[in-house]
């Protein structure tokens, strides 16, 4: 059936009659908040509602969604016979998207329209804005009718899938390219050898359940095996449960629902993992799934026409942290910046700088509409005047102006990235690639494969007939590789298209030995995803692959008021502005508090608050609090005995810390570093809650002067917590704080 296709929900908001919190929400890739802490939230005005949840990313973890919708059925979403229910109310429309962010309509068809294109036209309640005279908005209002599931539908998710999809509403159960977290003691090969089962499939889930009452781990292996073994999931689950009960690590096994197997592990398992954390320290969670394979991560690649604005900063942080994450799991990473120093925008830049050069020499200038009027160009004009005097007035040399300008702006960009803590290993010039003949070389390779032809394209949608006429042109057979249309390689004037330059650039990457590539782009480049995948596949005979990650816009606020930005107007918010205002570490962390393809709100006031509502403060405070406890603990303590850690809060924190390697792995496999942010918040919350127990129960305090053995055990736990937080923050290049003012 091909590769696994993930579907997930965006835009929605649910209100629940149970007080879900961040830790529950993070597990399901939702943000959840209690009404007790947010009484003014509209969703909390509904009778009996205790919490509300909204999406933290495009698609959630498959296992957690399966568990949630099968076992904690929302009445307005999915009905499962015999399942426990909670009162739920959908308070904002739900939209299904695939893993690329393209919306799925209510008939189950891919609209090929990105949710990121729709989101600017939505109100905060998830409904379409009053479009008034805005034609684009009216167009999206019609699209919204086709894709938005309203709360009057009793069954939402199941209706878009075929009969194969009954049990798992969020994803197709194909067997290729799945991601699952394995537990070593489930050895299906051994069970096959003994004749208990007949297949050795590995496409099953073994993960912690979203509900702690369901044990420490659950697996859907019986449900997966059922279709291979030609038996019911319950029958297989009963056989497997008896086998799992024999494993040394397992204390109790339960069968739930249609065939899930829930397992409670012995407490010694968790104490053993705690010892492992303190042995490995910050290396706990370091993996080798990359096997030192080379991978190229291209990010930022902003046009060299001015300083980095805040949108570029989001992509810069995403790419840099993703590169660090891939290094942590064993890849040999090259961080690359593609300099778009060819094309019309550079001609416009040269004209703009030449005016500033004339201005520096005392000439009166008028900046025409369409040029770059930014103040940041004045120092470049001054520099040209100092270096060349009036020489360029007498004989304008655009090549001299070009080289000086691009060198100056690229230096500004590098300085901005350095302030953000971002660096690159390689800078590749589009202009130099074109001069080297790489475009002609790569197009010839495609032509020799029969993938270039002369033909006609259909009229683009939305084009008026008087503005478009069909013409014969050179085309790449992009549709052969899954693209929507074949792509033009030459413009009407005979020059190469931007896409032709992209072909040359990716040919250059492949020629340098990169068969694994990631490119980070703004969400307005969503249309490039399929064509880039097509050309990489064509050039490499399917030997190389590319993953395109899109970052959405940043809504920036200052004292609650939006800050506008526009590079050509010269009045825009730069990455430097933000870092100088709130600091590098805060900027880097906040940029990953939402999934990269979701809109991010960034408010100066909130990110500087010292409260649990400020994510980076909450995590750093946990690390600093841990070090404060260790500093204040008695200097002479006995050797720690982790077996003394038995309370629910202590064990929950240990189990949360134990998830770190799995979080690292799935974050790296899915190229989603925001999961690290969510996890660190989950760890911090578990620790702060445990610390808080000591306020009402003196025996729950970490330091007990009359019980040094228990104090030593709790300091052992605190030490492990500090190692895991430090390990997580290292991926962000953020220094963990041991003290906070």
Image (cartoon, rainbow, N blue to C red):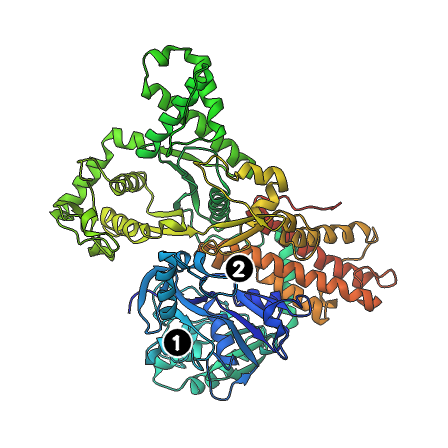
Residue reaching furthest to the right = 706
- The residue carrying mark 2 is 663
Please identify the quadrant where the C terminus is shown. top right
| Residue 462 picture location, percent across and down | 26, 55
**Tag 1's secondary structure?**
helix
Locate residue 449 relative to residue 532 in the image: left or right.
Answer: left
Would residue 612 be found to the left or right of residue 231 on screen? right
- Whether residue 640 is visible here, answered yes or no, is no
10 Å crowding of disc 1: few (<14), some (14-19), many (20+):
few
- State the residue at coordinates (52%, 57%): 675
Q: Quadrant of the N terminus?
A: bottom left
Q: Residue at x 47, y 74 (%)?
A: 66
In the displayed image of the protein, which residue is found farthest to the front? 133
In percent of width and height, residue 481 lies at 23, 55
Q: Nearer the viewer, residue 731 or 332?
A: 731
Q: Position of residue 132 (x, y in %)?
A: 42, 59
Q: Nearer the viewer, residue 420 or 264?
A: 420
- Observer-nearest residue: 60 or 141? 141
Mark 2 or mark 1, which is nearer the start of the sequence?
Answer: 1
Q: Are marks 1 and 2 in contact (CB under 8 Å)?
A: no
Q: Which residue is mark 1?
A: 193
Residue name at image x 82 percent, y 69 percent: 697
Identify the image quadrant of residue 686.
Answer: bottom right
Q: How many marks?
A: 2
Q: Nearer the viewer, mark 1 or mark 2?
A: 2
**Residue 169 seen in render:** yes
CA separation, marks 1 and 2?
32 Å
């Amino acid at each position: 059936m091909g590769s696994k296709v993930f579907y997930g929900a965006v835009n929605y908001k649910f209100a629940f009659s149970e007080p879900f919190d961040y830790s529950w929400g993070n597990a399901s890739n939702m943000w959840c908040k209690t009404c007790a802490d947010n009484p003014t939230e509209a969703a909390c005005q509904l009778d009996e509602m205790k919490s509300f949840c909204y999406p933290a990313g495009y698609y959630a973890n498959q296992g957690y969604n399966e568990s949630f919708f099968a076992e904690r059925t929302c009445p307005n979403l999915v009905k499962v016979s015999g399942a426990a229910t909670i009162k739920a109310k959908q308070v904002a429309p739900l939209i299904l998207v695939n893993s690329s962010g393209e919306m799925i309509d209510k008939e189950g068809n891919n609209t090929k329209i990105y949710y990121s294109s729709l989101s600017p036209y939505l109100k905060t309640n998830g409904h379409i804005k009053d479009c008034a005279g805005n034609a684009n908005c009216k167009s999206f209002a019609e699209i919204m009718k086709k894709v938005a599931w309203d709360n009057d539908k009793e069954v939402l998710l199941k209706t878009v899938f075929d009969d194969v999809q009954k049990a798992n509403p969020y994803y197709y159960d194909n067997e290729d390219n799945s991601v699952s977290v394995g537990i070593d003691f489930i050895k299906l090969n051994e069970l096959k050898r003994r004749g208990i089962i007949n297949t050795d499939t590995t496409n099953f889930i073994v993960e912690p359940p979203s509900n702690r009452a369901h044990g420490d781990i659950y697996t859907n292996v019986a449900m997966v095996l059922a279709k291979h073994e030609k038996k019911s999931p319950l029958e297989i689950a009963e056989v497997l449960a008896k086998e799992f009960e024999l494993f040394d690590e397992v204390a109790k096994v339960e069968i739930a629902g249609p065939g899930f197997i829930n397992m409670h592990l012995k407490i010694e398992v968790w104490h053993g993992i705690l010892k492992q954390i303190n042995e490995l320290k910050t290396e706990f969670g370091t993996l080798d799934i990359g096997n030192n394979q080379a991978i190229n991560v291209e990010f930022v690649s902003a046009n060299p026409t001015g300083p980095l604005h805040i949108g570029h900063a989001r992509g810069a942080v995403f790419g840099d942290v993703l590169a660090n994450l891939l290094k942590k799991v064993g890849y040999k990473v090259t961080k690359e910046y593609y300099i778009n120093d060819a094309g019309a925008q550079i001609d416009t830049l040269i004209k703009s700088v030449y005016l500033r050069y004339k201005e520096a020499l005392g000439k009166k200038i008028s900046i025409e509409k369409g040029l770059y009027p930014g103040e940041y160009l004045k120092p470049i004009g001054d520099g040209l005047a100092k270096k060349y005097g009036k020489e360029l007035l007498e004989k304008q040399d655009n090549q001299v102006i070009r080289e000086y300008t691009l060198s100056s702006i690229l230096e500004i960009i590098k300085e901005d990235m350095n302030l953000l803590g971002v660096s690159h290993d390689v800078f590749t010039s589009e202009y130099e690639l074109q001069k080297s003949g790489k475009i002609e070389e790569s197009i010839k390779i495609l032509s020799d494969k029969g993938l270039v032809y002369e033909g006609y394209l259909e009229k683009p949608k939305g084009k008026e007939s008087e503005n478009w006429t069909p013409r014969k042109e050179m085309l790449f057979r992009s549709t052969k590789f899954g693209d929507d249309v074949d792509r033009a390689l030459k413009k009407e004037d005979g020059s190469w298209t931007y896409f032709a330059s992209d072909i040359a650039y990716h040919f250059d990457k492949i020629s340098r030995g990169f068969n694994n590539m990631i490119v980070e782009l703004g969400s307005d480049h969503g249309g490039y995803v399929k064509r880039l995948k097509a050309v990489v596949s064509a050039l490499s005979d399917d030997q190389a692959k590319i993953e395109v990650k899109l970052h959405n816009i940043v809504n920036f606020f200052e004292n609650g008021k939006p800050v506008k930005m526009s590079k050509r107007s010269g009045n825009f918010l730069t990455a430097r502005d933000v870092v100088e205002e709130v600091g590098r570490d805060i900027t880097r962390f906040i940029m990953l508090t939402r999934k990269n393809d979701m809109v991010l709100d960034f408010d100066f006031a909130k990110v500087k608050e010292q409260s649990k509502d400020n994510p980076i403060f909450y995590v750093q405070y946990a690390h600093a609090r841990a070090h404060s406890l260790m500093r204040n603990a008695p200097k002479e303590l006995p050797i720690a005995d982790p077996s003394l850690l038995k309370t629910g809060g202590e064990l929950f924190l240990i189990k949360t810390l134990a998830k770190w390697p799995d979080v690292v792995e799935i974050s790296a496999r899915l190229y989603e570093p925001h999961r690290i942010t969510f996890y660190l918040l989950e760890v911090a919350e578990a620790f702060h809650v445990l610390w808080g127990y000591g306020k009402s129960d003196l025996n729950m305090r970490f330091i007990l002067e009359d019980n040094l053995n228990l104090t030593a055990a709790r300091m052992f736990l605190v030490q492990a917590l500090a190692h895991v937080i430090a390990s997580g923050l290292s991926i962000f290049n953020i220094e963990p704080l041991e003290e906070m003012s």
